[in-house]
Image (cartoon, rainbow, N blue to C red):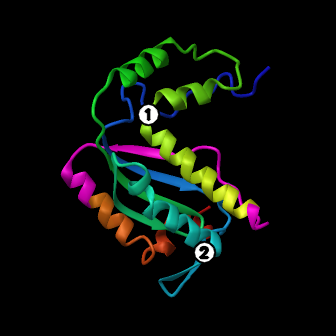
């Protein structure tokens, strides 16, 4: 029996994860500090953390529909506030139709891959960032791993976007109070 057969997707079934603004958080496996360290409210990035920053900064050049609004790389996670503005096309409508046909009780190992593919640009971006970072680390024989999933929040209005941007901008300074800080784990 597949251990993931009863697991539900954390993605909102009513949303395509295409056009919109998203607050994304991706965490390293076991919250290990692979990406850097913070001392006296100053972050010093590891080589992996620096490469992750490069990948984030290059998102817009590889994905013209993506606008990076704000981001921060922390010792064991990163936050990304992005806007996606894609022209509507029939292919995305077909993706939604495929999503509605997926059996949530299916025991296939690629069940979540099907959901991910159908759920649009956000999952593609995260999958790409995680993959590139992991390949970079492994190529340089560095220990590194991500948690399997990521957290997303669909940003609903300008006020919420401004609050999230401020949170990201102040994340390093507020590291002691961060839920990902080792003292809070």
* Residue 147 on image: x %, y %: 65, 50
Q: Which mark is residue 105?
A: none
Residue 157 lies left or right of residue 107; in this view the side is: left
Q: Look at the numbered disc 2 and give the secondary structure of its residue.
A: strand
Badge 1 is on which residue? 120
Q: Quadrant of residue 39?
A: bottom right
Depth order, front residue of 94/143: 94
Q: Which mark is residue 36?
A: 2
Establish if 73 lies above or below 121.
Answer: below
Q: Which residues are magenta?
A: 139-162
Establish if 33 lies above or below 2.
Answer: below
Depth order, front residue of 98/3: 98
Residue situated furthest left in the rendering: 158
Q: Earlier in the sequence, mark 1 or mark 2?
A: 2
Q: Residues within 10 Å of mark 2 (few under 14, many from 20)?
A: some
User: Is residue 110 in sight in this rendering?
Assistant: yes
Q: Look at the numbered disc 1 and give the secondary structure of its residue.
A: loop
Establish if 156 lies above or below 2.
Answer: below
- Look at 50% across and 11% down and name the residue there: 101
Residue 184 lies left or right of residue 155; in this view the side is: right
Q: Quadrant of residue 3?
A: top right
Mark 1 vs mark 2: give the one in front.
Answer: 1
* Residue 106 on image: x %, y %: 65, 15
Of the 4 image quadrants, the one containing the C terminus is bottom right
- Look at 25% across and 43% down and name the residue there: 156
Whole-Å distance between the Cαs marked 1 and 2? 30 Å
- Look at 65% across and 61% down and name the residue there: 31
Q: Is residue 44 magenta?
A: no
- Look at 57% across and 25% down and name the residue there: 114
* Residue 65 on image: x %, y %: 33, 45
């Amino acid at each position: 029996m597949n251990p993931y057969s009863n697991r539900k997707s954390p993605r909102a079934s009513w949303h395509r994860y295409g056009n919109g603004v998203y607050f994304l958080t991706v965490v390293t496996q076991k919250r290990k500090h692979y990406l850097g360290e913070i001392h006296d409210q100053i972050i010093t990035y590891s080589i992996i953390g620096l490469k992750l920053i490069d990948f984030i900064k290059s998102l817009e050049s590889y994905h013209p529909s993506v606008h990076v609004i704000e981001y921060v790389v922390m010792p064991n996670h990163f936050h990304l506030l992005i806007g996606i503005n894609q022209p509507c096309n029939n292919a995305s409508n077909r993706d939604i139709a495929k999503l509605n046909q997926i059996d949530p009780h299916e025991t296939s190992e690629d069940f979540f891959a099907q959901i991910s593919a159908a759920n649009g640009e956000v999952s593609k971006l995260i999958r790409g960032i995680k993959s590139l970072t992991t390949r970079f680390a492994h190529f340089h024989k560095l220990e590194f791993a991500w948690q399997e999933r990521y957290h997303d929040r669909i940003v609903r209005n300008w006020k919420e976007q401004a609050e999230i941007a401020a949170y990201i901008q102040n994340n390093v300074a507020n590291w002691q109070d961060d839920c990902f800080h080792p003292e809070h784990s």
